[in-house]
Image (cartoon, grey):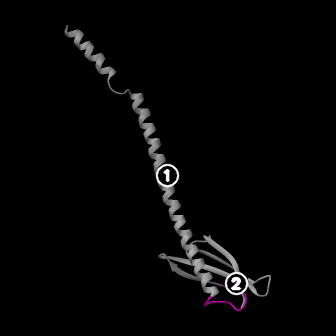
Amino acid sequence: MEKYSMKSLATNNSSKGFSLIEVVVALFILSISVITIYNLIISTASSSFELEQRYLAKQVADNRVALINTSEKPSKPIKRSGEIVMGGVNWYWVEEIKAGLDKNYYEYEILVRLVDKDNYIYSTQGFLNNE
């Protein structure tokens, strides 16, 4: 009778729990989902940073447009550049003011980039009344 009970215990133990294959498959699925979530978080953080940089560059360009329409209004075509700090970041801007198709207007283009980078993040173009 003791042999019978030990045999039944052995059979019951083998039917409980997960097999090695099931554990490996579960860990594989878990690792794939963790990697996917991690990549999503990194991508979102990177996109958020780029969006903030683009927004600040747009603000720099908008400030330059406001200045060329008011206190720094050009009297002739000119190309000028400078640096400004916005959002705790140093920005480099270049503006070119050219004669427009009509003598009453100037055409302007403003390019903005980070001081330590070569590629421009934001550019804008428009027309300026020549009065």
Which residue is at the front of the view, 108 or 13? 108
Q: Report helix, strand or loop for mark 2.
A: strand
Instruction: Identify the residue at horizontal 71%, vertical 81% (top origin).
Output: 127
Rendered-image quadrant of the N terminus = top left
Q: In which quarter of the image is residue 60?
A: bottom right
Residue 18 in the image, given as x and y percentages of width and height? 36, 27
Looking at the rendering, the stretch of residues picked out in magenta corresponds to: 70-79
| Residue 63 - label | none
As measured in the structure, the alpha-carbon distance from the residue carrying label 1 to the one carrying label 2 is 44 Å
- Give neighbour class at mark 2: few <14, some 14-19, many 20+ (Cα, 10 Å): some
Is 27 displayed left or right of 129 in the figure?
left
Q: Quadrant of residue 119?
A: bottom right
Q: How many marks?
A: 2
Up-down relation of residue 70 to residue 27 (above or below): below
| Residue 40 - label | 1
Residue 84 in the image, given as x and y percentages of width and height? 54, 81
Rendered-image quadrant of the C terminus = bottom right
Q: Is the magenta stretch mostly helix, strand or loop?
A: loop
Magenta segment includes 8: no
Which residue is at the front of the view, 9 or 64? 64
Q: What residue type is labelled 2?
A: Leu
Q: Report helix, strand or loop for mark 1.
A: helix
Q: Mark 2 points at which residue?
A: 128
Q: Is residue 114 visible?
A: no
Q: Is residue 2 visible?
A: yes
- Give neighbour class at mark 1: few <14, some 14-19, many 20+ (Cα, 10 Å): few
Mark 1 and mark 2 in contact? Answer it, CB < 8 Å. Answer: no
Residue 48 in the image, given as x and y percentages of width and height? 51, 62
The nearer-to-camera label among 1 and 2 is 2
Q: Which amino acid does label 1 sit on?
A: Leu
Instruction: Identify the residue at horizontal 46%, vertical 50% (top origin).
Output: 38
Instruction: Identify the residue at horizontal 60%, vertical 86% (top origin).
Output: 67
